[in-house]
Image (spheres, rainbow, N blue to C red):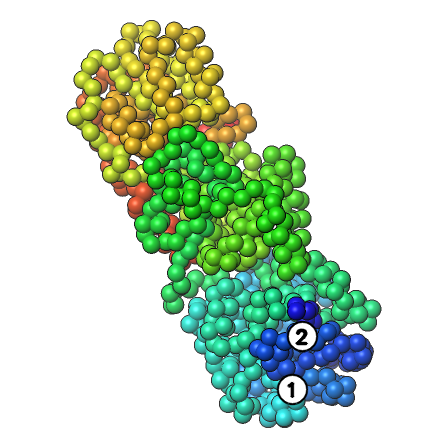
Amino acid sequence: MTRPLRILMYHRILDGSAGPRGNPSVISATPKAFREQMRYVARRYRALAAEELIDTLDAGRPLPRRAVLITFDDGCRDFGEVAWPILRELRLPATVFVPTAYPDSPGRAFWWDRLHAAVASTRRTELESPCGRLALGDPRARRAALRTLQRHVKTLPHADAMRLVDQWCAQLGEDAAPPADVLGWNELRALAADGVTIAPHTRTHPALTRLSTDEARAEIRQSADDVQREIGRPCPRLFAYPFGDHDDRIVDVVRQEAFSIALTCTDGLSWLPGDDCFRLRRTGITTRTTPLVFRGRMTRAGAYVDQWRHRGHERWPTAPPAPDRTTPRGPLKVAYIMSRFPKLSETFVLNELVTCAARGVAVEVYPLLRERQTTAHPEVEEWVRRAHFHAFLSVPVLRANAAWLRERPAAYLGLLWEVLRKTWGSANFFVGAVGIFPKTALFARKMREQGVTHVHAHFANHPALAAFIVHRLTGIPFSFTAHGSDLHVDRRMLDTKVAASAFTVTVSEFNREVIVRECGEEARRKVRVIHCGVDPDVFAPDGGSRPRGNRFQIVCVASFEAVKGHRFLVEACGLLKERGLPFDCHLVGQGPQRADVERRVASAGLGPEFHFHGGLPRPAVAALLSSGDAAVLASHPTPQGKREGIPVSLMEAMAAGLPVVASAISGIPELVHAGSTGLLVPSGDPVALADALERLAGRPDLRARMGKAGRARVMRAFNLHTNTLELVRLFSSGTADTGTDDGRAGVGKGIGQLRKGDS
């Protein structure tokens, strides 16, 4: 039977006039307020000792009704002097979490107390900090500055954070660090003998996710050893994360160190059995908790309100965890989310899945929609069988959402509200968000059950939103790849998704600059350029199959959409016919504008020259390219904002040894180096397009030279195997290495055109 457990979290019990001991940020209650709260608990609830709680869970027994666990963090002296006498009088057990480097170390002081003392006593009126210039002119400004500094410290690696605190205290004129005011070991032993549970809280109270795995393990293990040695009895199997800071990596360490329960600082009830015992919630008591508020927060409804109020954060700033370079991670299992699957025109997604699997990555596929096409690539059948296709609304979907609502009501409702609020204003994005949210909640539960270690989405719009939802519900890290129109048409929540991601991938330097301008310069370190790649073994030159007639063979592989610019290609081919150039133009692809293109071809009298092949699988595309003389893509941004990333069809043509003619927009100049691997023309200019094709038609030597240089370019920077290996490395490390790429040379031209308004 599952029942709720209320865990109360206190720090210090002091009057507001407690002098240097009275850092207001860590005072939970006055002695008078604490006595009133504990009297209410003693009358209405069943307080458990930590050992009783663990024994109950180990035995599989249900919790007592109205169960409460009373906890104190940091082991401060006022627990022994003020809190424990009240608790002992009322016969209420308590657990005290002690950072074990502090007892009997009078020279040590908590960094937050040092900052408070320095800010409170300084004569300075302002302080320069990484957060900007902070005013210190009056008490209110000092309190705000202190909150800002403390929040920033918690985002940094521990060693860097402590150096920064030292620097600030020196600038503020710290005379002497305030005492840590922690109970000594003799006092802790006496409390333990009197019935108090003394439990570990690390040694030095660091933010654990800002440490490497080995450093975090040492902090946790040594604190447990200290408790057992000093208290003289086995260490309780109960742990509290300093600041509540934890992630999957730290949870694994705590579990491996033989603890049974770990406590966070996230407000709300915990339901046992059922909730994750290594992420139990606590109700944090503050001086704003009046008697009426306390009674309300102790109820189930009040606990849900707490969870709602603190939705989306856990009293902890969102910042990336410290890179872990000391302990290898477990088996890599990546869940891919994409808009549609299997989609013939998105060969890059299928290629990436196949190559990741070949590299030993366990891959799960979660499409938002099932694409049903009569033509498919040879490898796709196996992946379709393995894919997790689900309706937008079904009994499993409803059950999954109900389970999240019960398990994490505040997180679930807060996330839903955030998604709706931030997508409102864009009909397409809002409707899509409403549609995918329920089934993504089911995805999240399935991924957690499967042991997925990372979620990756293709496209920055709804698939990335789905990955973000999974991350917020489960804590599984996520990333996404931004391509073309998904980034340029509607950037709703882009900043939120980039900030929450472990890293963000995009296919071009052009796109990275777009993301940085949209999300701020701080996003640059998270965005990694990894080009989509092609298999150079599938797309390879085959001079023997190329026809030797006098008709120039043009190949265009592109879906029939406005952004691909077919109408400009038809106009250019009309000019070629007027100039007397014999040619054939082969169109490969399918899409909503095929009928319109066919009408344009017929109207221009180009029926004999144009050949519509429809959608083709990859081997057939490779064969057609082998028989061509040049590839063309007349891409043009649409009025709705759709634009290219770096088209994979151009990579395939270059790998096959064809020179290419393409529009000089977006990331295309990063692939096609004008005059070297192909020719670039202004977007939407059929005359320039015809001139470039005519030039290639009359220069077989130029075609051969460009074809050879183009294949070398693809082999070097757009190789599927090399680029996917880089992505797998990021999946494993969970961080972005913002190195540069030799495609940067083409960025300036594309960015300049974006600024001129062609989007």
Closest to the observer, 188 or 683: 188
| Residue on which the image places disc 1 | 196
User: Looking at the rendering, in which quadrant would you find the N terminus?
Assistant: bottom right
- Taking the spot 47% from the left edge, 35% from the top edge, the residue there is 371
Residue 472 drawn at (x, y percent): 57, 54
Given the image, on which type of amino acid does mark 1 rest? Val
| Residue on which the image places disc 2 | 63
Closest to the observer, 537 or 63: 63
Does residue 475 appear to the left or right of 352 in the view shown? right
- The kind of secondary structure element at disc 1 is loop
- Taking the spot 54% from the left edge, 33% from the top edge, the residue there is 489
Q: Residues within 10 Å of mark 1 (few under 14, many from 20)?
A: many
- The mark that comes first in sequence, 1 or 2, is 2
Snapshot quadrant of residue 92: bottom right
Name the disc covering residue 619, or none: none
- Taking the spot 47% from the left edge, 59% from the top edge, the residue there is 451
Does residue 238 appear to the left or right of 80 in the view shown? left
Closest to the observer, 304 or 717: 304
Residue 664 visible from this viewpoint: no
Relative to 193, is 651 above or below? above
Mark 1 in CB contact with mark 2 (< 8 angstroms): no
Residue 640 visible from this viewpoint: yes
Relative to 42, is 579 above or below? above
- The kind of secondary structure element at disc 2 is loop
Per the model, the C-alpha gap separating discs 1 and 2 is 21 Å
Residue 638 drawn at (x, y percent): 51, 25
Mark 1 or 2, closer to the camera = 2
